[in-house]
Image (cartoon, rainbow, N blue to C red):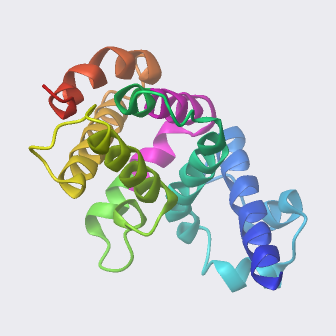
């Protein structure tokens, strides 16, 4: 029970921080405002995060919460390729609507320069677990190619998704991320389909 409460507290802090970052901008949001918005304490904040910069990496876990929300809605008999497209659309729509593009760009830049933890590459995340599950099932059902291993396909899919996000950041959000992904991702991952 204590572990569940800890996850809930951390999640409240992360959600409050990203809400404020989106509304006010990263620079204009203080730790005190995050604590107030989350309804937690200063001690709780510093238990989970060294400071405001540490929250940038938490975006990966915020994305995982979206996947956890979507997972129960996935039909067991649905085509795995179509599920991948659906998950991508839902995630990128959430990012486009609730994540400040400058923060997303900052997250990507910190992942390139940090020596420590790199949340976007953490294969213990819900994101990777769910991709492995969907792709393994798709291979077993003959929907996805057997020419590549599950790990290779997960890596390729994640790389394609990051490419879409990175390009959107480079272009400063001059187009709809979810619409662009709906057009480009099917072309990018078509090779995952079984012949």
Q: Is residue 98 left or right of residue 161?
A: right
**Residue lying farthest to the front in this orientation:** 141
Q: Is residue 150 above or below residue 6?
A: above
The overriding secondary structure of the stretch rendered in magenta is: helix
**Residue lying farthest to the left in this orientation:** 147
Q: Is residue 28 left or right of residue 161?
A: right
Closest to the observer, 68 or 108? 68
Residue at screen point 54% across, 68% down = 53
| Residue 43, position as x, y percentages in the image | 81, 85
Q: Quadrant of the C terminus?
A: top left
Q: How many marks?
A: 0
Q: Is residue 39 left or right of residue 114?
A: right
Q: Is residue 132 above or below residue 22?
A: below
Q: Quadrant of residue 14?
A: bottom right
| Residue 20, position as x, y percentages in the image | 73, 48
Task: Specify the segment rendered in magenta.
Answer: 86-107
Closest to the observer, 65 or 129? 129
Residue at screen point 75% across, 64% down = 13
Residue at screen point 81% across, 60% down = 33
| Residue 115, position as x, y percentages in the image | 29, 79
Q: Quadrant of the N terminus?
A: bottom right
Residue at screen point 28% across, 31% down = 143
Q: Quadrant of residue 12?
A: bottom right
| Residue 27, position as x, y percentages in the image | 60, 54
């Amino acid at each position: 029970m204590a572990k569940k409460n800890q996850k809930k507290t951390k999640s409240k802090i992360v959600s409050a921080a990203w809400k404020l970052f989106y509304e006010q901008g990263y620079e204009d949001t203080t730790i005190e405002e995050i604590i107030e918005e989350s309804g937690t304490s200063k001690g709780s904040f510093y238990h989970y995060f060294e400071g405001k910069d540490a929250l940038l990496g938490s975006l990966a876990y915020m994305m995982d919460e979206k996947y956890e929300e979507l997972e129960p809605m996935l039909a067991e008999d649905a085509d795995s390729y179509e599920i991948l497209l659906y998950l991508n659309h839902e995630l990128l729509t959430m990012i486009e609507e609730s994540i400040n593009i400058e923060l997303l760009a900052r997250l990507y830049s910190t992942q390139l320069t940090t020596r420590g933890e790199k949340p976007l590459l953490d294969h213990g995340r819900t994101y990777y677990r769910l991709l492995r599950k969907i792709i393994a099932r798709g291979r077993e059902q003959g929907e996805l190619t057997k020419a590549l291993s599950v790990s290779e396909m997960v890596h390729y899919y994640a790389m394609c998704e990051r490419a879409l996000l990175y390009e959107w950041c480079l272009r400063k959000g001059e187009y709809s991320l979810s619409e662009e992904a709906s057009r480009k991702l099917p072309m990018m991952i078509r090779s995952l389909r079984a012949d």
